Amino acid sequence: MAEAMYRAEELAAKARQMFGTTPEIVTVALKTAGKESATIEDAKKTVQEFLNREVK
């Protein structure tokens, strides 16, 4: 069974509970990765990669 996909707006709305960050961070992380929707696990991975990336 495939995991449920959620729109970026839905994931951002639950940013604090699910990702421990702000809705803006979730929105930008997904947008930067080119994702309009994602599973919860994929979104968590994308947000972590965004937060941990090197600033140039």
Image (cartoon, rainbow, N blue to C red):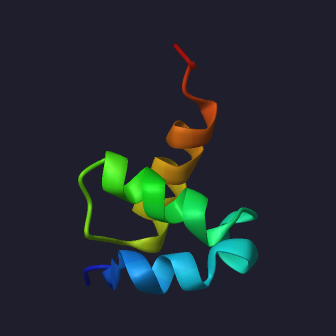
Q: Position of residue 25 (x, y in %)?
A: 58, 57
Q: Position of residue 29 (x, y in %)?
A: 45, 52
* 45 or 36: nearer the viewer: 36
Q: Taking 50 as reference, is 31 above or below it?
A: below
| Residue 39 as seen in the image, left or right of residue 34 | right
Q: Residue furthest top?
A: 56
* 42 or 8: nearer the viewer: 8
Q: Quadrant of the N terminus?
A: bottom left
* 7 or 55: nearer the viewer: 55
Q: Looking at the image, which residue is at 58% across and 45% down?
A: 48
| Residue 8 as seen in the image, left or right of residue 1 | right
| Residue 22 as seen in the image, left or right of residue 35 | right
Q: Taking 36 as reference, is 54 above or below it?
A: above
Q: Looking at the image, which residue is at 57% across and 19% down?
A: 55
Quarter of the rendering containing residue 20 = bottom right
Q: Position of residue 42 (x, y in %)?
A: 41, 59
Q: Looking at the image, which residue is at 33% across and 81% down?
A: 7
**How many dots with numbers?**
0
Q: Position of residue 38 (x, y in %)?
A: 33, 69
Quarter of the rendering containing residue 28 = bottom left
Q: Taking 4 as reference, is 50 above or below it?
A: above
Q: Looking at the image, which residue is at 31% across and 47% down?
A: 33
